[in-house]
Amino acid sequence: MQSLLLTHIKLLLNTRSEAHALYGSQMREVPRLDNAWLLIEGCEIADFGSMDTIEQDFSQLPENRMDCSGRLVLPAWCDSHSHIVFTGSRENEMVDKIHGLGYAEINAKGGGILNTVQKINEISESELFDESWKRLEAVARTGTGAIEIKSGYGLSLEGELKMLRVIRRLKEKSSLEIRSSFLGAHTFPMAFRSNHAAYIKQITEEMLPVIAKEKLADYIDVFCEQGFFNPEESETILRSGMSFGLLPKIHVNQLHAIGGIQTALRVNAVSMDHLEHMPEEEIALIKKSGWKGICTLLPTAAFFLRMPFPPARKLIESGCAIALASDYNPGSSPSGNMNIVYAMSCIQMSMLPEEALNAATINGAHAMGLGDVCGSVSRGMLANLIITQPVPSLAYLPYSFGSNLIDKVILRGNLIG
């Protein structure tokens, strides 16, 4: 078994013995070791400690060592909301938005999600895999070690299966931990715009049985939004997915508050994602409910769409668990760089660097059901780590948001290039 010893680590972050999700004020807590060492054996974190006692901790130091003087070592990012399997780009729609068209307006005239749906239907599964693999390798180089990937650009049995099979192939080949979500309820295809019930029936009676039989998804997801799927339709689809063993997630309150929060609570969703529009009474409702899921915030989507940022401070102060994710997709967040997500959360959502670190690592892992595998520096966890350039402090990472401050990325104990 190959061993690697990291030595003279300026600051080893998120060292935990118990890696449970963090709620409210707990998110400020980032256990750390100054002047530390960390031992990797095989694909796992074997041990860590202080350089002051390293001679006592080892009878013989491993030959394979890396000096991390001046550097921070932290868990690799856990991106719990992405749409990384797509083809083509939609920069023309960005220009439409500059001219004043809204997200829903572009979708209503056949653009937006439907633009990418057409392109997905025109490409082979092999080509789609090759394009998606390149994106996955790129986000790994920026420090992402775990990622959830959604379907939702097929909107037909054939198209959704194509996407989910590509995600399965990515899982099999990649060093990243990957979870898949079936998002056939992303929008209504043009042919079903006036017959919602028929498309919902196609999802529940045609798509889900095949997806469950082939074990292609971990989660069921719905875009619950005005002009897309209403709360009643969303609940029908989520409960159908749950009957096939898929856990519920939900896109909710991105553009409007239409009752999707109540739907999420009724089905006990693993995560509520987006939450740009959160009336005070709905934040209070979440608190009163005692719900123990994750609020997944996507600041780069709000930035790209020039929308209000999610109210991270209010959610944290109400006791919620926050995760941060990229929403990497071709229409509203064409970037999977979690370093930008991390910085933007501090700068635009007033999250403390410690809160944002926990949100982008341990809570992101829990939003994917991976909290016992990655997201913290814990003995027995996967050795998915970021080694920074020499920096003065954790706060320097969001402060110097335009700089590449990653020196090395380790996934499953191996350096990636």
Image: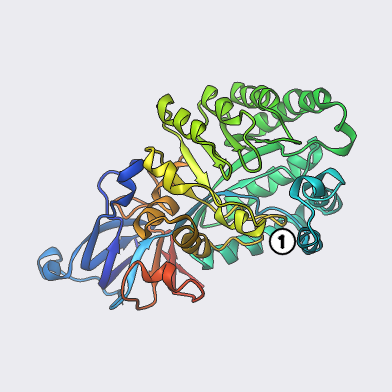
- Image coordinates of residue 63 in percent, x first then y, are 27, 75
- Image coordinates of residue 371 in percent, x first then y, are 40, 43
Which element carries disc 1, helix, strand or loop? helix
User: Please, which residue is most extreme toward the right here?
Assistant: 191
* Rendered position, 69 above or below 78: below
Q: Nearer the viewer, residue 284 or 371?
A: 284
Residue at 54% from the left image edge and 24% from the top image edge = 267
Task: Tell me the amino acid under the disc marked 1.
Answer: Glu
Q: Nearer the viewer, residue 121 or 112?
A: 112
What is the quadrant of residue 336 in the picture? bottom right
Left or right of 236 on screen, residue 416: left
Colouring method of the image: rainbow
Quadrant of the image for the N terminus?
bottom left
The residue where tag 1 is placed is: 131
Left or right of 165 on screen, residue 327: left
Q: How many marks?
A: 1
What is the quadrant of residue 217 in the picture? top right
